[in-house]
């Protein structure tokens, strides 16, 4: 893992300056890779919740991620940086938002399917555009607004297949929790963009976030209880700890240093496509022509969003 981080940092230095074409291309790749891994998490969480209570799943996922990151921090001589960031108010606030978003997602996914969850959580793109307009001065231009609208309409087509009644049936509670998670995460994305200006050590910062998410999720176990995980439960925990936490957070945070908050959030709509494909393969959900059109609209929205920032 330490070797991977070293290679990652060398690759990140490719480019001819901040905001250069090479750096922006790498940022896109990082963000899309993060979206891919996070897209798989919705289905893995749905599967893992068959074997684990939501609070326990969330706690163990981030506990393991925190332990792994702490080992890397200590071995690489970054522990002092980690310690200093523990009391940074902006970072702690962002960590609280991240933890709350995850709590709402895990609770919500107990009552709804993975693709519904991914759709509603990724409506954060709309909230990010609004918050970023006021907090980050990322102006909501006509082209940008159109791109966001196209992406969201495509997402709705992909999930609903033009049958909106499915969102208001037995999944209503889970859907509302996931929608609220999307709202919370939109604030998290915007505040994280501000935090990138602190030039804090990446690994130390992520470790602080994982640490606080672990701490904030612990009290929920009191209400839901704790049971010994089965083999399937541990597989879900380990997969999400490494491939849906450590790796994608590292990729996303470095991408966010170059990309705008709105662009990053639009790219996350790819999570919906990945989640839908996996549910098609694993749980037998259908992928109609309407859903394929929706996926293409999502991609078009991402391209237009990126273009809108080049033209300003």
Image (cartoon, rainbow, N blue to C red):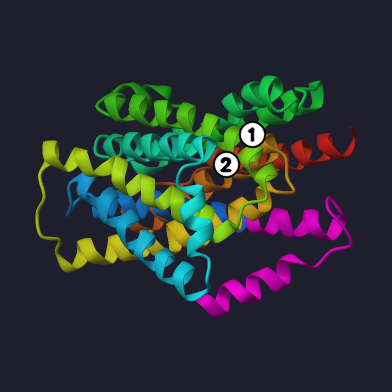
Q: Position of residue 57 (x, y in %)?
A: 25, 51
Q: Which mark identifies residue 269?
A: 2
Q: Which residue is mark 1?
A: 151
Whether residue 123 is visible here, answered yes or no, is no
Q: Residues within 10 Å of mark 1 (few under 14, many from 20)?
A: many
Q: Is residue 29 magenta?
A: yes
Residue 216 sits in quarter: top left
Dot 1: what SS? Answer: helix
Say whether marks 1 and 2 touch (CB < 8 Å). yes
> Could you say which quadrant of the image residue 48 lies in?
bottom left
Spatial CA distance of label 1 from label 2 is 8 Å
The residue lying at 62 percent from left, 41 percent from top is 195
Q: Which label number is shown at residue 249?
A: none
Locate residue 116, reporting x and y percent. Answer: 40, 36
191, above or below 11, in the image: above
What span is in magenta?
A: 1-30
Q: Who is closer to the viewer here, 50 or 53?
A: 53
Q: Is residue 221 magenta?
A: no
Instruction: State whether residue 89 is above or below residue 183.
Output: below
| Residue 101 visible within the image | yes
Mark 2 secondary-structure assignment: loop
Task: Using the image, determine if residue 88 lies above or below residue 21.
Answer: above
The crowding category of the residue bearing disc 2, from other C-alpha atoms within 10 Å (few below 14, some 14 to 19, many at least 20), is many
Q: Position of residue 224 (x, y in %)?
A: 13, 40
Picture residue at 64% right of the left edge, 34% below the top: 151
Disc on the earlier residue, 1 or 2: 1
- Whether residue 37 is situated above or below residue 160 in the rendered picture: below
- Quadrant of the image containing the C terminus: top right
Which residue sits furthest bottom?
A: 3
In the picture provided, is 11 more to the left or to the right than 298? right
């Amino acid at each position: 893992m330490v070797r991977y981080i070293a290679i990652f940092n060398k690759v990140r230095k490719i480019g001819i300056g901040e905001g250069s074409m090479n750096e922006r291309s790498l940022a896109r790749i990082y963000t899309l890779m993060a979206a891919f891994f996070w897209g798989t998490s919705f289905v893995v969480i749905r599967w893992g919740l068959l074997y684990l209570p939501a609070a326990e799943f969330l706690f163990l996922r981030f506990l393991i991620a925190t332990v792994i990151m702490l080992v890397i921090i200590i071995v690489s001589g970054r522990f002092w940086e980690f310690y200093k960031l523990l009391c940074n108010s902006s970072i702690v606030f962002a960590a609280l938002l991240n933890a709350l978003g995850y709590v709402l997602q895990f609770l919500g996914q107990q009552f709804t399917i993975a693709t519904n969850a991914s759709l509603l959580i990724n409506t954060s793109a709309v909230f990010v555009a609004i918050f970023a307009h006021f907090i980050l001065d990322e102006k909501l231009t006509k082209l940008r607004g159109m791109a966001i609208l196209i992406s969201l309409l495509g997402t709705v087509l992909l999930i609903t297949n033009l049958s909106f009644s499915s969102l208001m049936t037995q999944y209503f509670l889970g859907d509302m929790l996931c929608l609220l998670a999307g709202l919370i995460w939109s604030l998290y994305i915007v505040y994280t963009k501000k935090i990138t200006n602190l030039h804090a050590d990446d690994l130390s910062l992520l470790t602080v976030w994982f640490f606080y998410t672990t701490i904030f999720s612990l009290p929920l176990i009191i209400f839901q209880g704790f049971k010994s995980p089965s083999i399937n439960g541990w597989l879900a925990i380990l997969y999400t700890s490494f491939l849906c936490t450590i790796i994608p957070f590292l990729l996303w945070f470095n991408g966010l240093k170059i990309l705008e908050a709105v662009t990053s959030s639009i790219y996350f709509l790819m999570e919906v496509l990945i989640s839908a494909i996996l549910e098609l393969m694993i749980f037998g959900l259908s992928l109609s022509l309407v859903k394929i059109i929706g996926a293409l609209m999502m991609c078009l929205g991402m391209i237009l969003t990126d273009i809108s920032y080049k033209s300003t």
